[in-house]
Amino acid sequence: MDNVDPRRLIPRTNDLLALPAVLEARTRMGGHVIRGLVRDLQDQARRGDLHPAQIEPALLAAVADHRATSLRPVLNATGVIVHTNLGRAPLSADAVDAVVGASGYVDVEIDLASGGRSRRGAGARAALLHACPAAEDALVVNNGAAALVLATTALASGREVVVSRGEFVEIGAGFRLSDLIESTGSRLREVGTTNRTHLLDYQKALGPDTGCVLKVHPSNFRVEGFTLSVALEELSPVTKASGVPLVADLGSGLLAPDPYLPDEPDVSSALAGGADVVIASGDKLLGGPQAGLLLGRKEIIERLARHPLARAVRADKLALAALEATLAGGPPPVVQALHADVGQLRRRTDELAEALGLPVVAHDGRVGGGGAPGVPLPGWALQLPEDLAVLLRTGDPAVLPRVHDGSCLIDLRCVPAADDHRILAVVQHALALRAGRFAAGAG
Ligand SMILES: *Cc1c(COP(=O)(O)O)cnc(C)c1O
């Protein structure tokens, strides 16, 4: 018996696939996924990493645990509201309902009364124009970068895009707006210097080769000291006189001024300042789905909508549904987190601290996503030992804390109050695991 090669005990594929629990799983798992699991387990046994007798229980556990997506929900305890690595903006309950509703067949491009074709995303467009009365027209594309590519391609391909040297932004993961613009076949015409650009710099650059003038909000950095930039209000009479479109890329997605963020530009003010087209992002400060928003003068928006590239960067129905519901429904989580009541944050943090016997420290949240750099959002955090962070991240649910200055900090700003008890449970579990480890280490 002892001499039998264990590899000969590996169950056959067909026998494993015929197990009742595996047959049942075929209604909620792709056949290739199940066969892949079987093959993996058999390979592990062939290598000697798994005893053949463990294949069947391992397979049953794997099909029972199977989820169709590998994306895991995370409780964001960092205090960073628009967290790029966590998918930026969580959707509002209304937007989630809208996405579910739009997941089947929907009238995204048909007028049900006449049976004729309708303008795609008319509802999202109407909601944008309602929120931003200064805009004559609006177009929604896949994301902010796509909006910028569409605008510069349609307005300036083969010609010049005039931009200040102080506004050459790298938006993250090595993406530079200047590279993006040059990829459209436009030529960058840089004006001014890193710290100072004058109106005269723009005036000297304008000419027959100018496709458009672009103002980029340097969203993720600040230049301080001896600086000068030209406001839209100053620039727009000059571009208008030359008949050149003035495009403003705001980066974020405020549609109107927010008293909490006095230095953050917004679409309504940019249009009032004379921009012909304003580019904003759906999943930064607007708190909606990933989307690029183009708002402005009717003839220019129509020109962009008719450009062949518009088809390549069009927004999908789920994003259009979520965007409309973000605008028309209740305040999205991003707005709630930004305007969170500090006293309430303190009470919630104190309650957890008391239940856990841990200290509370003052902690500043951040807007994140390249918005309002350096603007602190005063609040509180639960202070834990740094080595707890990994146990929280791998907890159930996963909790992402902030690791800072040798501490693991839990800031409740971006955690819905209804999830406080889940944070408590995950922290308790992590503390128990850690205590167990120390006991084992000492023993
Ligand atoms: C974020 C950002 C973009 C790109 O927007 P995405 O929605 O990420 O594609 C463009 N311009 C500026 C100034 C930005 O901050």
Image (tube, rainbow, N blue to C red):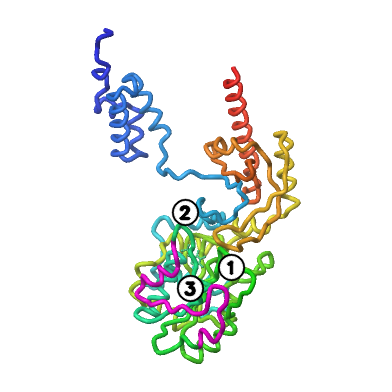
Q: In this orientation, which residue lies closer to the viewer: 171 or 102?
A: 171
Q: In this orientation, which residue lies closer to the viewer: 76 or 197?
A: 197
> 166 above or below 417?
below
Q: Residues within 10 Å of mark 1 (few under 14, many from 20)?
A: many
The secondary element bearing badge 1 is classed as loop
Of the residues tagged 1 and 2, which is closer to the observer? 1
Q: Report whether residue 126 is seen.
A: no
The region drawn magenta spans 175-203
Q: Between marks 1 and 3, how big is the CA–CA gap?
A: 13 Å
The tag on residue 294 is 3
Q: Between marks 2 and 3, how big is the CA–CA gap?
A: 25 Å
Q: Residues within 10 Å of mark 2 (few under 14, many from 20)?
A: few
> 69 above or below 282?
above
Q: Which residue was labeled with disc 2?
A: 100
In the image, residue 4 lies at what x, y percent? 24, 12
Quarter of the image with the C terminus in it: top right
Tell me which label, 1 or 2, sits earlier in the chain: 2
> 76 above or below 233?
above
Q: In this orientation, which residue lies closer to the viewer: 319 or 115?
A: 319
In the image, residue 429 lies at what x, y percent? 60, 31
The secondary element bearing badge 2 is classed as helix
- Amino acid under label 2? Val
Q: Horizontal placement of 264 versus 13: left or right?
A: right
Picture residue at 56% right of the left edge, 82% below the top: 198
Q: Which residue was labeled with disc 1?
A: 254
Q: Is residue 436 magenta?
A: no
Q: Is residue 180 magenta?
A: yes
Q: In this orientation, which residue lies closer to the viewer: 95 or 313?
A: 313
- Amino acid under label 1? Leu
